[in-house]
Amino acid sequence: MKFIMRGLTCILISGLIGATAAYAQDSTKPWPNKHIRMVVGFPAGSVTDTVARLIAEQLSKSLGQPVVVENKPGANGAIGVGEVARAAPDGYTLLVTNSSSITINPQLYKQINYKASDFAPISMILDAPFILTVNPDWAKKNNVANAKDVISYANRQPDKLSYGSAGQGNIAHLSFVSWSNRTNVKMTHVPYKSASQAELAVISGDLDTIFDTLSAMPHIQSGKLKALAVTASKRIAQLPDVPTMAEAGYENFEVTFWMGLLAPAGTPAPIIQKIYEAAKQINNDAKALAALKNNGEVVMLDPTSFSQRIKTEVPLWGEVIRREGLVLE
């Protein structure tokens, strides 16, 4: 028995030594030499998740390793984003998220566990405006035909107008707060777990209005939603007959949000560049590119340009948050 145990011990030790040697050997291979995690702080089926899966497929093809999407929803993306901020900066943990979670959350939430500088920007993927949409039956019943009429309704019936968003502190939420404050009206915010849930609430009549994304286009085209204005600087190709918020009478009300690919700060620059070069190959895939364009303008900013975009936006949103006196736990 003693001999057998000694034999087993030798085998186990030998196996561990072999495994360690194999691991050491793998670590010397060029990056990447194993699967890559891509964390999304929003639910499966959300716009961010859709974009992430398109980029993950492209990276997998270009880099020759599986890219596995992991959904870690909650707290306006902060749960998943915070996990990536604490991950090893080795290129094997990536993040696809929207601008709310990077430029707004750290300034809005008291107990957030990350900041924008905890990430190495790789590439901005999409830039998109919001669409002010309403339930068409509600609009007809209350004579709401444009953005001005929404404010008129809110003036007539304070706090009765309900608007939704994908959670407290989301860019859509802050946009409504800013709009209501500048027009001196009271609205009621109803937070949802995702933008798609808020969208469905407007369609069902449980909610009056939202700042929606381009994912709403099928519902707008079918008549389930009515588009009143867009928050871009100019009219968008998908809705050429829908005015901008500026055209609707609200000057300097331009809001766009981005979706981008990031890694933990400290990830080696050659790896960041390699991921960027792989990601932008999606421009050569007509089908994937068309799917991305359904959600916004495809803008594959390089790491330096994307980093500058984030640095510019952080103080701008910080000013809005301070001006509106917004602080969340």
Image (spheres, rainbow, N blue to C red):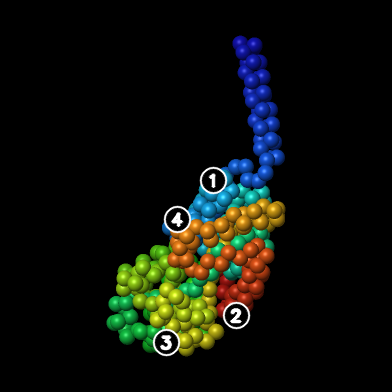
Q: Label 2 to label 4, Cα distance in Å?
A: 34 Å
The circle drawn on residue 323 is 2
Q: Label 1 to label 2, Cα distance in Å?
A: 45 Å
How many tags in the picture?
A: 4
The circle drawn on residue 148 is 3
Q: Of the two numbered discs 2 and 4 on the same chain, state the one appearing first in sequence.
A: 4
SS of the residue under disc 3: helix
Q: Which residue is mark 4?
A: 44
Q: What kind of residue is marked 3?
A: Lys
User: Which residue does the image show at 50% across and 81% down from the upper left?
Assistant: 234
Q: What kind of residue is marked 2?
A: Arg
Residue 104 at x, y percent in the picture: 58, 69
Which quadrant holds residue 299?
bottom right
The circle drawn on residue 66 is 1
Residue 173 at x, y percent in the picture: 49, 73
Q: Is residue 27 above or below residue 225?
A: above
Q: What kind of residue is marked 4?
A: Ala
Residue 265 at x, y percent in the picture: 68, 57
